[in-house]
Amino acid sequence: MEDLDIQRAQFNDLWSAMKVDETLWPRRYAATFSLWRTRSRAAQVAMLEKATGGIGRKNPYFYVQDFPEPQPEWKTGGETGEDLVQVRYNGLFKICTRETMNLFNLEFVKNWN
């Protein structure tokens, strides 16, 4: 049950950031929340970042439905000052930050630096 409470709190942050005009889009909260729960954590985080300041006159359900799935940001391995790790992604070995690995739930291979 706690997981649902956490997800609802995170969704409420998104709902507030979207500044939904509930007179224009009534009764969209529950359906949008159900759809949002099916999206990856990376997409949820990206939606919140992009929605800050509102989504204008867009239907919130379609905002969540049509939001593109984000892709991990890969590094070259020569970056300094970052916590880099090697991960396996689609059968390939890639380098990214530990934060990216956790956000996208990537398979850890080894620490890079």
Image (cartoon, rainbow, N blue to C red):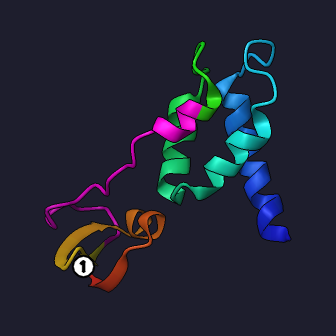
Q: Is residue 112 left or right of residue 83?
A: left
At x 57%, y 19%, the residue is 58
Q: Nearer the viewer, residue 41 or 100?
A: 41
* 111, above or below 97, in the image: below
Task: Say which residue label 1 marks.
Answer: 112
At x 61%, y 23%, the residue is 59
* 89, above or below 44, in the image: below
* 64, above or below 77, in the image: above
Q: Is residue 67 left or right of residue 34?
A: left
**Residue 93, located in which quarter of the rendered image?**
bottom left
Q: Is residue 57 left or right of residue 108?
A: right
Query: Where residue 14 appears, x then y in whole percent?
Result: 67, 38
- 81 inside magenta stretch: yes
Q: Quadrant of the C terminus?
A: bottom left
Query: Where residue 109 appears, x then y in whole percent?
Result: 29, 86
Query: Where residue 105 appears, x then y in whole percent?
Result: 44, 72
Q: Residues within 10 Å of mark 1 (few under 14, many from 20)?
A: some
At x 53%, y 37%, the residue is 49
Q: Nearer the viewer, residue 46 or 84?
A: 46
Q: How many marks?
A: 1
Q: Is residue 110 left or right of residue 56?
A: left
Q: Main secondary structure of the magenta part?
A: loop
Q: Regarding mark 1 in the picture, which secondary structure is present there?
A: loop
Q: Quadrant of the N terminus?
A: bottom right
Q: Amino acid at mark 1?
A: Trp
- Give the farthest residue toward the bottom: 110
Query: Where residue 110 appears, x then y in whole percent?
Result: 29, 87
The residue range painted magenta reads 62-84
**Residue 24, located in which quarter of the rendered image?**
top right
At x 30%, y 83%, the residue is 111
Q: Nearer the viewer, residue 75 or 30?
A: 30
